[in-house]
Amino acid sequence: MLFLFYLNLIIIIMFMFLKHPLSMGLSLFIQTLIISMIMSMMINNSWFSYILFIIFIGGMLILFMYMINVASNEIIKLSKKMMLMMFIILIFFTLKNINMNNMNYESMLNIFNINIYTMKFYNYPMMNLMIMLILYLLLTLIACMKIINIKYGPMRSK
């Protein structure tokens, strides 16, 4: 989990140097994914992190469509010095936190318990909610496709 904190910190630092709106959106998406993973690891019931992620992705899709219209022909320029610096920092934090002596039976048992909590979403009591969520997303996808097909073309017209 400490690795995810460091990765989130690197993405925050990298966000300050980005200039293109699409690359900023990508870094926000990755940061949201990391934060929702951290939240799901910290609490046993991770529905809050799933809902937060889905809501944020909906907002990001709207921003993405807006930015495609505004900055469609801009070229994304990546600074090689910044990418090298971020890669070195990531390797440093990764190598600093690797400690093979701490791998014991208790840590393996904790990993197994995390997998058990994840599998509970697909078992009987939560299975109905999961099926309802999947059907809701499918219905939303079909409704969006029907709205787009009314005009017989893409949402963005030239």
Image: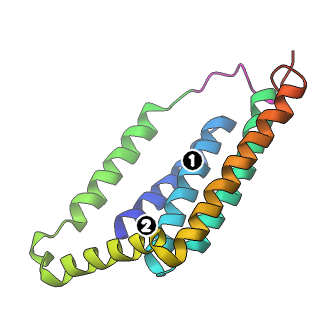
Instruction: Estimate the spatial distance between the alpha carbons at disc 1 and disc 2, rounded to whole Å.
Output: 15 Å
The kind of residue on which mark 2 rests is Phe
Q: Quadrant of residue 108?
A: bottom left
Q: Residue at x 72, y 51 (%)?
A: 58
Q: Which residues are magenta?
A: 70-76
In this picture, residue 121 sits left or right of residue 27: left
Task: Indicate whether residue 143 is drawn in magenta.
Answer: no
The circle on residue 94 is: none
Residue at the outermost top position: 158
Q: Secondary structure at mark 2?
A: helix
Residue at the outermost bottom position: 106
In this picture, residue 74 sits left or right of residue 23: right
Rendering coords of residue 126 (x, y %): 53, 74
Q: Quadrant of residue 105?
A: bottom left
How crowded is the residue under tag 2: few (<14 C-alpha within 10 Å), some, or many (20+)? Answer: few
In this picture, residue 85 sits left or right of residue 157: left
Q: Secondary structure at mark 1?
A: helix
The circle on residue 27 is: 1
> Considering depth in this image, is 84 or 111 the residue closer to the camera?
111
Q: Residue at x 48, y 71 (%)?
A: 121
Rendering coords of residue 7 (x, y %): 42, 58
The kind of residue on which mark 1 rests is Ser
Instruction: State whether the magenta stretch is mostly helix, strand or loop.
Output: loop
The circle on residue 5 is: 2
Q: Residue at x 64, y 44 (%)?
A: 25
Q: Upstream in the sequence, badge 1 or badge 2?
A: 2
Q: Residue at x 49, y 60 (%)?
A: 34
Tell me if I can see residue 49 in this picture.
no
Tell me if I can see residue 43 in this picture.
yes
Rendering coords of residue 21 (x, y %): 69, 37
Q: Quadrant of residue 133?
A: bottom right
Rendering coords of residue 140 (x, y %): 75, 48
